[in-house]
Image (cartoon, helix red, strand yellow):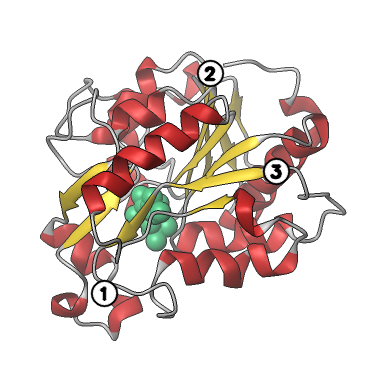
Amino acid sequence: MQVVICKDSNTAAALAAKILADRIQANPKIVLGLATGRTMERVYENLRQFPLKFADVSTFNLDEYIGIKRSDARSYWHYMHAHLFDHVDIKDENIHVLDGMAPDIWEAAAAYEDEIEVLGGIDLQLLGIGRDGHIGFNEPLSSFGSRTRTVYLTQTTREQNAPMFGGDFNQVPECAVTMGVGTILEARELMLLATGVEKAEILAQAIEGPITSMISATAIQLHPDCRVVTDVAAASALRHKDCYRRSIAGDIEFSEYKSMRA
Ligand code: F6R
């Protein structure tokens, strides 16, 4: 694992976007796994600034709420179009977002796994981290072998996401459909972005803590090519900073990260 500590959240988002842009440039037919949430908003904002061709890029989003229509501004379908897809030349048929209104959600989840396989697997999976350590919507106790499926959201997650639902966690759907931890671990490369002091404790457990299905993000420790991009605030609870190859308070020298492998 590589841990890159940036001086602030803007720099971390810019670095994550730069890495994505580099991967797209190197492989115009890349299959990307994408995440939503507040942390990613600035990543997509930065990514949109690059003169990139998305015509042959395929994407698979991690998750979606169950019972929220795609046309609803709170759906992740809507989020992805607002923050990225409507700004780039990606083809509709190359966009894959789970449908929380699918008549048979279990069949749709299985079909999602098949679609990923048909396209040869995910090259780079972008991840955020929830306050309870979820990646995607893999809440505590998600098996590391879990596949795309329906899940119940924890109270912590519903409270975390309440701002998008008028501040009332009761309005946040109780259920979601998410790629599994096993699905995520099969991506060829992982990049987890975490910023802000509210992520500090859980990020330290994800990177330095014992591997446990109670904290799905600890599964990234098992991945052979995983990079964590973070800022000083989110890195503040890490105890072994001297172990990391990059622990920077100044500006990222973007040209240098490429030479470092996980
Ligand atoms: C969303 C997702 C979640 C978020 C996580 C952090 O697609 O996969 O795991 O990345 O809940 O969300 P924010 O960035 O809003 O704190």
Above or below, 104 against 174 in this view is above
- x, y (%) of residue 183? 36, 29
- Amino acid at circle 1: Ala
110 on left or right of 227: left
Horizontally, residue 138 falls left or right of residue 207, namely: left
Relative to 76, does residue 206 appear above or below in the rendering?
Answer: above
N-terminal of the pair, mark 1 or mark 2, is 1
What SS does tag 1 mark? Answer: helix
Residue at 75% across, 18% down: 259
Report if residue 227 is visible in the image: no
Q: Say the numbered circle drawn on residue 57.
A: 3
Badge 2 is on which residue? 225
Q: Pointer 1 and pointer 2: residues touching (CB < 8 Å)?
A: no
Task: Decide if residue 139 is in sight here.
Answer: yes
User: Does residue 114 lie above or below 56 as drawn?
Assistant: above
Circle 1 crowding by C-alpha within 10 Å: few under 14, some 14–19, many from 20? some
Tag 2, which secondary structure? Answer: loop
- Quick one: 91 or 20, which is closer to the camera? 91
Q: Residues within 10 Å of mark 2 (few under 14, many from 20)?
A: some
Name the residue rendered at 53%, 57% in the picture: 40
Image-quadrant location for residue 218: top left
In the picture of the structure, the residue carrying the numbered disc 1 is 162
Mark 1 and mark 2: Cα distance apart in space: 33 Å
Crowding near the residue tagged with mark 3, few <14, some 14–19, many ≥20 C-alpha atoms within 10 Å? some
